[in-house]
Structures are given as C-alpha cells and as structure tokens.
Image (spheres, rainbow, N blue to C red):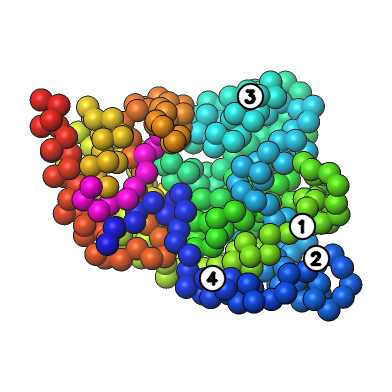
Amino acid sequence: MTAYLDHASASPLRPEVSAAMAQVLEIPQADPGRAHDGALVVRDLIEDSRRSVADLVGATARQVVFTSAITESVATTLAVLGAGRRVLAGGTERSSVIDGARRAGALELVDVDESGHLDLHHLTRLLAGGPALVCCQVANHETGVLEDPAPIIELARRHGALVHVDAATATGHLPLALGDLDADAVTITGEMLGGPMGCSGLVVRKGRPFGSLLVGGAQERGRRPGLENLLGIVGFGVAADVAAAVLDAERAVARSQISLIEQAAVSVDGVQAVGDPRPDHRAPHLRCFSIEGIEAEPVLLGLNRVGIAIHSGSACSSESLEPSAVLAAMGLDAERSIRVSVGWSTTDADVDRFVDRFSGVIADLRALRS
C-alpha cells in the first residue's frame, strides 16, 4: 500500500461521503429549480449541504455559493470584485490569483518576508494608489504558513478596498469563523477534507451584492448560473459534517504526524523546513522542505518507487515541474522543495514509511549525482 501524504492536493473520499454519494445516484435526477416533488427532493439535499458547509466554516447558509473548483471561486472573485480595481497580492498566492490578475493587467505584488507573511507597510503604501482588491490567505497552500486576515481586512477597509481571502487549505483543518471575518469573498473547498473533487465554494459578505462570472440562469441566487452539481454538493456537505465533528481530534493527530515527518526530514543533511518556524503559525497538516542540491522531480519519483506519494512545492503540469513562485517570492530556492501533507486517512504506518525511507532515497539520489 502507498503511504499517501498529499492531502493538501486532495484527500481520499471519507467513507461517509462515498456512501452518501452512492445513495444520491439512486435518486431520480431532477432540476432543483422546478416545483414538482422530484425537484424538491433534490433542492432539499442541496440546501442541507449548504447549511453543513456553512456550519463548518462559521458562516450562514445564504452566504455559501457552490462552485466547481478553487480556480473558479478565484476567477469569479477577480471578475466580480476586481473589475476596475488593482489586485494587490503577495507572490505567495495561488497561481489562479496571480495569473488571473496578471492576465487582466491589474496585478501589483505585495512584498512578503522570508516566512511568507505579507508586509503590511508595503500593502499600506500600495493601498494609497486608488481602488483595489486585496488578496490574502488563511493558510498557504505550499508552506502552510498562517496569516491572520483580520488586520489585513481592517487596513483594506480604511482605504476603501475590497478583500478576497483564500481559506481553501484551512477548510476542515482549522476552526474558521468566516461570517465574522467580514471579507467580501472567501474561497473554500471540500476536496482537501475528504469531499469529492470538483466542488468548492465561495462565502460572500452579508448584505453585499455579488454578481456572477457566468450568465444565463438564476441558480445559487444568480451568483453561479447553471444546474447544480448534486453529487459534489452532497459529498461536500457530508464531508463538512464529519470534519466538523472531528476537527479538533484530527488537528491534534495531524500536528503530531507532521512533527514526526519534520524531525525525520531535517535530520538529513541539506534538508531544511520552509516557512514560519513557529508551529502555531502553520497549518497543522502540511510542511514544506527544501533539499540542497537535488531538484524536486527525482525526489518525487524516488519516493514514489518506495511507496510514498507527496507533492513538490513547485507547480506541477502534465510534463514538468515549474519553479515554485511561492518560494521565489520568499527569496528561497524555488526549484528544490517538496510538500508533505497528512489528512483524515493518514496512519501511523504511513508516517513510519516516510520516516524509514526518506533518508535512503535522498542518499541514493546524491550518490547518483556524485
């Protein structure tokens, strides 16, 4: 069996989610926007799931908009809130934020420090330049570094700016109170907590009109036209229910597992942990490491051969690994990093396999280079 340590990309489906989605397949398909009995059954399933997701992230059900992916949530935010505004974002943001804003010709990069935290003094100077949409994260997707969005939102409000918060990596792994945060839009997802791929969401600010990226329908209160992804939404809702019930326990286990992984990794010469060194300033379930002298791809392949699945800190395409824009923004080596992430299904045996085999893989790769 492979030790799957790539939960920050996607987690396996929780058993409860698989069972619920199988039950949905037995329900007659119907448009939830209609008034007949079959449609009302589907509508109830969607709204029950919306309440479950809202409860998990500390928002109201009316604030939750279901989308197909993190990328769609970001693209919608950039289109709806970013129109006519500069987009102020650290280089540590997801590529969907950076590339989307850059394509629109609106991106202005905010400095970050070597731990990946936004430079609020630089952000203040940029905010003085006119209408803006500020983008920030709760937990970084590569390093796990935590950022408190509250002072960033307060700063943005003083300058009349709007705010998008990326809470996708934090969803289901950290307690969230997004309804109290008062951001204009927050991206969340279910795929990293044991829900299905292809279903994410936005939490929109109470009382704020929020348009849509697409047109042609009134679904999701006009915020996301198109027939709803019933299977994905139900799966997200069930995953949210389960995650909410076990969040504290899973977080404690994840922190312990990551600590063991970190101890094993940094005991190898030339391997360093990346990001904020303080455990309470990092997401509990992931850690990024730089490896001196060895690029990411051979490390991934070497670990895969011994039954360990992880991800690079770099951006993966189907053919190559691109340098990590996140690490480059932090002034670090952008081509030699890996990301290890645990989740609900990670066992002690998975961690033990990494602890037992990581150093040998690195030693073999260095022997080949010499």
Q: Are marks 2 and 3 in contact (CB under 8 Å)?
A: no
Select label 4 or label 3 by which is in front.
4
Image point (20%, 33%), residue name: 270
As drawn, the label of residue 31 is 2
> Is 168 on the left-hand or right-hand side of 212?
left
Q: Which residue is mark 4?
A: 17
Q: Is residue 34 magenta?
A: no
Residue at the image point whose x is 50% and y is 61% from the top: 193
- Circles 4, 1 touching at the beta carbon (< 8 Å): no
> Which badge, 2 or 1, is on the more N-terminal residue?
2
Q: Which residue is mark 3?
A: 102
* Residue that mark 1 sits on: 227
Q: Position of residue 325 (x, y in %)?
A: 46, 29
- Up-down relation of residue 314 to residue 355 (above or below): above
Q: Please give the range of residues in magenta.
A: 305-315
Ranked by sequence position, the earlier of labels 3 and 1 is 3
Kindly indicate whether the residue at mark 1 contacts the one at mark 2 (C-beta within 8 angstroms): yes
**Which is more foreground, mark 2 or mark 3?**
2
Q: For the C terminus, which image quadrant?
A: top left
Q: Can see residue 112?
A: yes
**Earlier-in-chain disc, 4 versus 1:** 4
Element carrying mark 4: helix
Front disc: 4 or 1: 1
Q: Amino acid at mark 4?
A: Val
Q: Position of residue 354 (x, y in %)?
A: 23, 53
Check disc 2: other Cα within 10 Å, few if <14, some if 14-19, many if 20+. some
Residue 307 lies in the magenta-colored region: yes
